[in-house]
């Protein structure tokens, strides 16, 4: 479950990063298009105004100006296209790097979870019982660690490998039980 949560967080983070990059990319494209359109419209307006005010002889020069604007527009479109392609490649590269990093993180977290599960399993009191020992508990569930905790008549439960024994204490003996 923790591995799935980690995977969910990593994938969610990756989706957000990719979404933000796409939004930024789209905003750059929009701004470039607006700037290009504005400059082009301004140039066309200037050209139109000049063509109305210049004498007929200047028509040849205006034709060259129009041709220049057409070429400038084509160069601008090519430049914007190259920038967009570069941004798309950078975005794809970032996405390509994100997948291996995410998988490495998931593998590392999976190993950490597995290690913790093994430690928890090793510390489980049932492992002691499976080796042939018993866990002696008071009826309230607390583990008996000192004979004074179970005076004469105290009801006890001994957890053993194949079940539970109900016992009644006859009291403790001093000096026994230490190695």
Image: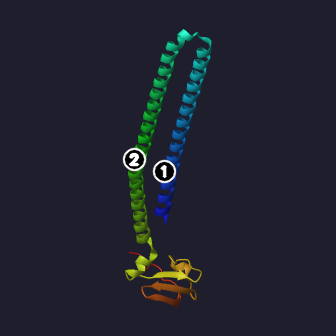
Quadrant of the image occupied by residue 36: top right
x then y, percent, for residue 149:
55, 79
Give the total of numbered labels: 2
- Contact, mark 1 vs mark 2 (Cβ under 8 Å): no
The colour scheme used to paint the residues is rainbow
Q: Which of the numbered marks, if any, corresponds to residue 157? A: none
Residue 13, relative to residue 77: is it above or below? below
Q: Position of residue 48 (x, y in %)?
A: 60, 19
Dot 1 or dot 2, earlier in sequence: 1
Residue pictured at 44% horizontal, 85% vertical: 160
Which residue is denoted by mark 1 in the rendering? Answer: 14
Q: Residue at x 47, y 59 (%)?
A: 7
150 or 134, nearer to the observer:
134
From the viewer's perspective, is residue 126 above or below residue 108?
below
The foreground one among 163 and 113 is: 113
* Secondary structure found at label 2: helix
User: Residue 152 at what x, y percent from top left?
Assistant: 56, 87
Please tell me which residue is depicted at 40% across the width and 63% down the height of the picture.
Answer: 115
Decide if residue 110 is on the left or right side of residue 34.
left
Question: In what element is the residue under mark 1?
Answer: helix
Estimate the spatial distance between the alpha carbons at disc 1 and disc 2, rounded to whole Å.
11 Å
Badge 1: residue crowd in 10 Å (few <14, some 14–19, many ≥20): some
Q: Is residue 26 above or below residue 174?
A: above
Quadrant placement of the C terminus: bottom left
**From the viewer's perspective, is residue 145 above or below residue 24?**
below
Pointer 2 residue:
97
Q: Quick one: label 2, few (<14), some, or many (20+) residues within 10 Å?
A: few
Which residue is rendered at x = 42% and y = 85% of the image?
Answer: 161
From the top left corner, tell me how far across and down residue 177 is, in percent: 43, 79
């Amino acid at each position: 479950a923790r591995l799935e949560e980690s995977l969910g967080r990593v994938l969610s983070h990756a989706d957000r990063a990719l979404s933000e990059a796409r939004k930024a990319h789209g905003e750059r494209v929009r701004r470039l298009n607006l700037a290009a359109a504005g400059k082009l419209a301004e140039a066309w307006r200037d050209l139109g105004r000049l063509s109305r005010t210049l004498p007929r002889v200047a028509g040849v020069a205006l034709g060259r100006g129009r041709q220049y604007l057409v070429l400038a527009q084509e160069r601008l479109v090519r430049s914007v296209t190259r920038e967009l392609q570069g941004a798309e490649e950078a975005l794809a590269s970032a996405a390509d790097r994100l997948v291996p990093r995410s998988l490495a993180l998931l593998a590392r977290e999976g190993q950490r979870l597995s290690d913790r599960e093994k430690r928890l399993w090793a510390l489980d009191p049932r492992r002691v019982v499976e080796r042939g020992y018993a866990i002696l508990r008071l009826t309230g569930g607390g583990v008996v660690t000192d004979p004074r905790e179970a005076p004469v008549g105290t009801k006890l439960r001994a957890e053993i490998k194949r079940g539970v024994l109900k016992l009644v204490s006859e009291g403790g003996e001093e000096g026994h039980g230490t190695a």
